[in-house]
Image (cartoon, rainbow, N blue to C red):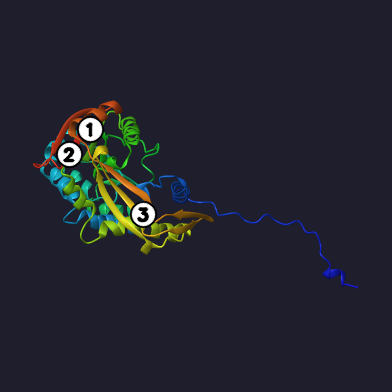
Amino acid sequence: MRNPASLPVDVPRSPSPGPAPLSEFGREMQAGLSRRARSVSPKFFYDVEGSALFDRICDLPEYYPTRTELGILTDRAAEIAQQIGPNAEIIEFGAGSLTKVRLLLDALETPRRYLPIDISGEHLEAAAERLRADYPQLVVQPVAADYTMPLVLPAPGEGAGRRVGFFPGSTLGNFTPDEALSFLQLAARLLRGGGLLLGVDLVKDPALLHAAYNDAQGVTAAFNLNLLRRANAELGADFDLEAFGHAAFYNAPLQRIEMHLVSRCAQSVVLNGETFEFAEGETLHTEHSHKFTVEGLRALAVRAGFRPVAVWTDPERLFSVHWLAA
């Protein structure tokens, strides 16, 4: 006779644990890999390492946008400050390392408060601490958030002047045309009674654009591939970084640079228990950067509810900075 203790017993089984709930990054990466034309938002480039790599990109000899915009902000600082007025509250969308805003703060008359908004909270807080040390009279309140979504900001302080948005770096070009309009509409509502200081890259010789996104040192390539490293580290994915390459080119009909990660071979990638097959040459579209004409940007601003007032460009008309009244 078998020992009763050894007989099988019907014990209700707990359901097998499914995949762990994903972060916003995980959900969007999984959705992006599931599309026929695979893509993911460039906002996920900016973890701590990605933000540091972008800071290096801004210093590259081929990458003209940063130094050109800084030149405009420096040369036209007094005119810009006159448009903004005294005691302003500055809201910077996608603030990053808080470098360009220093030129603005130095030019303005008694700026009251600065609210930098960025998705990379750790990077933002470190940059905010450095800014507080250099501008002890300025109230600095960093906001870790996705600035493309509806925002709830602190009420304007007593005696504050205009509430002014600052959106440099041609980040607007990373949006689709519909997304750009939606963001500007959101900003126009948020900044009502104030305005937006907006930097956008201009349409130009494709050779200049190609060089800017395919630098000789390979920093932009590392920045692009860091997205996969981040997915491995944060999401438990198994991307082989050696099996993907960086590709960036100018799509002239759409007036935009496109960045992709290209599969060097037929391979499979696992994310959250789901397998995704990549054919050789298949890409993951990671960013597009639309280029603008001055007239086209001003027309878009009017559609969004702004009143275009002033525009400043460099002598070669590589880049433009716009003051838009809200």
Please report whichever mark, 1 or 2, sits nearer to the chain's N-terminal start. 1
- Kind of residue at badge 1: Leu
In this view, the mark in front (3 or 1):
3
Q: Which residue is mark 2?
A: 320
Residue 169: where, in percent of width, then height? Answer: 24, 45
Please report whichever mark, 3 or 1, sits nearer to the chain's N-terminal start. 3
- Residue at image point 32% right, 47% down: 287
Residue 302: where, in percent of width, then height? Answer: 26, 26
- Residue at image point 24% right, 47% down: 137
Front one among 167 and 201: 201
Q: Pointer 1: residues within 10 angstroms few (<14), some, or many (20+)?
A: some
Gap between marks 1 and 2 measured at Cα: 10 Å
Question: In the drawing, what numbered circle is on residue 281?
Answer: 3
- Residue at image point 35% right, 52% down: 45
In this view, the mark in front (2 or 3):
3
Q: Secondary structure under badge 3?
A: loop
Front one among 218 and 55: 218
Q: Which residue is mark 1?
A: 297
Q: Pointer 3: residues within 10 angstroms few (<14), some, or many (20+)?
A: few
Front one among 196 and 182: 182
Please report whichever mark, 2 or 3, sits nearer to the chain's N-terminal start. 3
Gap between marks 2 and 3 measured at Cα: 36 Å
Residue 33 visible to the viewer:
yes
Residue 89 visible to the viewer:
no
